[in-house]
Amino acid sequence: MRSKANENICFFVLIFSILAHSRGESTYRNVTRFLLFVGHARTGHTLVGSIIDSHPNAIVANEADVLGRVLKKPEAMVCGNGYTDCDQTDLDKIRSFVTSVIVSNSKQNRNSGRFQTGYDYTIRVNKSEIVLVLGDKKGGMTTSLLLKNNGSLFDERVSVLQRAFGVPVVFFHVLRNPFDMIATQAFRNQFGHKVHFDSFKNVSFDRITKAVKQFVAGEEAIAEMKKGKYEVIDFFYEDLLDHTQKELERYAEVLNLPFSKLWRTEVEKLVYPTSHATRDLMAWPRDVYEVLKAFCEHVPLLSRYKSVYVQSANIQETK
């Protein structure tokens, strides 16, 4: 027979568990935006994602891949027929599962250090119990999903997130100098992250050509997104470096977050004043270079880069 003391302990444990669960649910009851990234690797998504995640009222996972991997897990596939037959109970389960993945990922990255491609993106700011923004930084894979099946899977999965969370899904589109971005992407894709920059001169023309084609296709698809129902906000990596406070104010405004001076101070410790001009470390095939140059001149969003090109000595004729 259990003693009276043991019964009391069990009772208080039960009450504590109920209160803890209620507290956990209420923590995310005030979410007003769900943040995703769209764009390309090597543009500054990781830095921007870390900055938003460090805000006291935001939790942003680092490459949890919500649209891809997470929504394909059994815990999220609860509707029987894709996501078209979801009732409210199903949507509640999806919201709870996606939230748990994002929170766990963010917490793990904050505790162990937000390291990626040799850089530490950790920003230490105390978190509030009131969460206004949930999200995931996985720009390249989001764009890949957008390009598949005319975007049908992309539309379906964004729709279920909107229905599950009952808030707008906002897309951050971060850009940097396309010549630097493509040079670094081609280099990393060929040699990985542990090879010295001296190897830039050995990047193959095929790698460069593939990176340019992916960039153009991605930007064209994102331009179509903006014409439709999606809220896509453009940001430039160079603006973050040159005008950090102004960009932080933009992030906060778009995401309906309060601006915090402490947040700004901690972010400024991480932001480097300059970026690498990797475009001049690599030999470019002239035909591919001309395609990228013409694209930047044609697209108004990229017009700021039309006078920033590659040194002529690094442009080579192709056979």
Image (cartoon, rainbow, N blue to C red):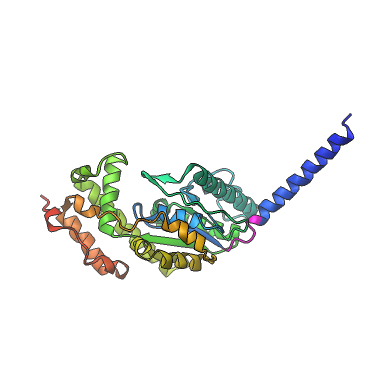
Q: Residue at x 28, y 68 (%)?
A: 304
Secondary structure character of the magenta stretch overall? loop
> Percent from the top left, x then y, of residue 202?
19, 43
In the picture provided, is 101 more to the left or to the right than 117? right
- What x and y, as percent, mark residue 272? 35, 55
Q: Which residues are magenta?
A: 27-32
- Name above or below for residue 3 compared with residue 187: above
Position of residue 282 relative to residue 264, above or below, is above
The answer to which of 132 and 163 lies nearer the viewer is: 132
Compare residues 247 and 64 and report the one nearer the observer.
247
Q: For residue 247, which quarter of the picture? A: bottom left
Residue 271: horizontal and vertical position, in percent? Answer: 38, 56
Number of numbered discs on residues: 0
Q: Quadrant of residue 225?
A: bottom left
> Can the viewer see residue 111?
yes
User: Which residue is at 25% across, 51% downward?
Assistant: 183
Q: Residue at x 28, y 51 (%)?
A: 211
